[in-house]
Image (cartoon, helix red, strand yellow):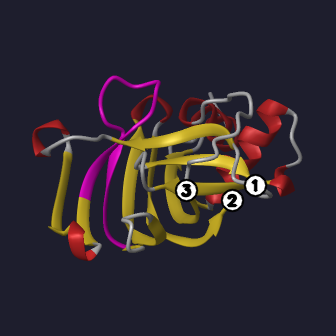
């Protein structure tokens, strides 16, 4: 029987994709605060409750790549519509974490609003590389600001998420919000 700690480690191993750090000069990253609650069962079959933050993702990526976790940060990448762990000092890519499917509503992604005014409300299914289907979903509002040339200069995305790993008997839910821009 798996202990709660073993289940959490397995979950993070499934969610996270360890990659070598590769700089990406064009990527725009915004620190992502990802806070929530998870439910699982213990060896007696009782439901247990715990909390988690974005630091869980950062710590796993750091451990897998031999990097000091204080040098890394969890981010939202607006152009890619995904989450990643990057170097805090320059925003260089270290690893993908969770992706939102791109495309239209038939492929699991719905966006309403007026992108030319920089305001949208989005529902998207969440994916990782280890599952053939979605692992959960998010709903949130995104406010993007652009300069006169159409370049993104600021982005704020906040909302709620839920996802599950049935093979681990774990269910997660919580809220997210972007913060400061990281890197160039």
Which residue is pictured at 59% across the width and 56% down the height? 75
For label 1, the residue is: 90
Q: Is residue 133 magenta?
A: yes
Which image quadrant is residue 155 in? Answer: bottom left
For residue 43, say whether it is visible: no
Asked if labels 2 and 1 touch by Cβ distance under 8 angstroms, the answer is yes
| Left or right side of 124 for 97 | right
Which of the pair 174/167 is nearer the observer? 174
For residue 82, say whether it is visible: yes
Q: Is residue 37 magenta?
A: no
For label 3, the residue is: 28
**Element marked by disc 1:** loop
Asked if labels 3 and 2 touch by Cβ distance under 8 angstroms, the answer is yes
**Element marked by disc 3:** loop
Q: Is residue 134 above or below residue 178?
A: above
- For the residues labelled 1 and 3, the Cα–Cα distance comes to 11 Å
């Amino acid at each position: 029987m798996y202990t709660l700690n073993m289940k959490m480690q397995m979950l993070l191993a499934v969610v996270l994709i360890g990659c070598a750090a590769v700089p990406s000069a064009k990527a725009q990253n915004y620190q992502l605060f990802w806070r929530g609650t998870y439910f699982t069962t213990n060896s007696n079959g009782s439901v247990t409750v715990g909390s988690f933050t974005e630091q869980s993702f950062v710590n796993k990526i750091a451990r897998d790549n031999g990097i000091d976790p204080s040098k890394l940060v969890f981010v939202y990448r607006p152009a890619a519509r995904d989450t990643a762990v990057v170097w805090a000092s320059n925003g260089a890519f270290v690893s993908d974490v969770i992706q939102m499917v791109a495309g239209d509503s038939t492929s699991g992604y719905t966006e309403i609003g007026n992108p030319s005014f920089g305001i949208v409300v989005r529902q998207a299914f969440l994916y990782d590389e280890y599952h053939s289907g979605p692992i959960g979903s998010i709903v949130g509002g995104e406010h993007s600001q652009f300069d006169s040339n159409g370049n993104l200069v600021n982005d704020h995305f906040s909302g709620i998420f839920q996802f599950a790993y049935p093979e681990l008997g774990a269910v997660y839910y919580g809220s997210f919000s972007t913060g400061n821009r990281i890197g160039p």
